[in-house]
Image (cartoon, grey):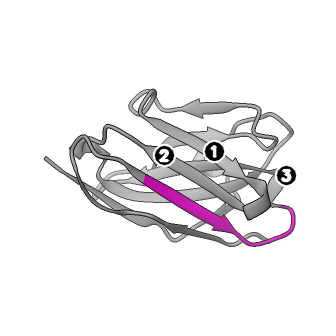
């Protein structure tokens, strides 16, 4: 069982930066693939970024590529999402998720994630 708690959301002006954190409980955090998703009002939950366990592979949605960076610190049971050059269209509730998967495999579908956090709101003003 893994419990996930996100933090770091807030209000920022367009062009600004935020770093989201997701702290996981459980001794086996290091063996889970991790991902970030977001959901805007009235829309589906969309994939943002994924990181394999072992941190050997990452994958990003085209809309955030070169602006967002996903990383993990297994010693702190934490996964991060560094968000730069934020745009109003990045406004959403951001969720982190954990998935059991083979070493080096990134997971991009919501259906393949086993555990979810409660979400943190990110609002980007124009």
Circle 2 crowding by C-alpha within 10 Å: few under 14, some 14–19, many from 20 = some
Q: Is residue 21 found inside the magenta-colored segment of the image?
A: yes
Q: Residues within 10 Å of mark 1 (few under 14, many from 20)?
A: some
Residue at 38%, 31% in the rendered image: 63
The residue drawn where x is 81% and y is 45% is 101
Query: In this figure, which residue is indicated by the disc labeled 1?
Result: 71
Q: Is residue 108 visible?
A: no
Left or right position of 39 against 91: right
Spatial separation of the CA atoms under disc 1 and disc 3: 14 Å
Q: Nearer the viewer, residue 52 or 19?
A: 19
Asked if disc 1 and disc 3 are in contact, CB closer than 8 Å, the reply is no
Which span is picked out in magenta? 19-28
Main secondary structure along the magenta-highlighted residues: strand
- Tell me the quadrant of the picture where the N terminus can be found: bottom right
Q: Is residue 58 magenta?
A: no
Circles 2 and 1: CB atoms closer than 8 Å: yes
Question: Residue 7, image x and y in percent?
Answer: 49, 67
Q: Nearer the viewer, residue 40 or 16?
A: 16
At horizontal 73% and vertical 62% (from top left) the residue drawn is: 77
Q: Earlier in the sequence, mark 1 or mark 3?
A: 3
Question: Residue 79, position in %: x, y?
Answer: 64, 54
**Which residue corresponds to mark 3?**
31
Look at mark 2 in the image and give the residue it sits on: 82
106 or 44, which is in the foreground? 106
The location of residue 14, given as percent across then percent down, is 21, 44
């Amino acid at each position: 069982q893994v419990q996930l708690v996100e933090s770091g959301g807030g209000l920022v002006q367009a062009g600004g930066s935020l770093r989201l954190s997701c702290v996981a409980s459980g001794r086996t955090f290091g063996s889970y693939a991790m991902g970030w998703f977001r959901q805007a009002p009235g829309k589906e939950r969309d994939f943002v970024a994924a990181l394999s366990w072992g941190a050997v592979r990452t994958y990003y949605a085209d809309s955030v590529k070169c602006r967002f960076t996903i990383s993990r610190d297994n010693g702190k049971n934490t996964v991060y999402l560094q968000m730069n050059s934020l745009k109003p269209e990045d406004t959403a509730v951001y969720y982190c998720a954990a998935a059991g998967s083979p070493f080096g495999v990134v997971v991009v579908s919501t259906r393949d994630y086993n555990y979810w956090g409660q979400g943190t709101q990110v609002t980007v003003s124009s």
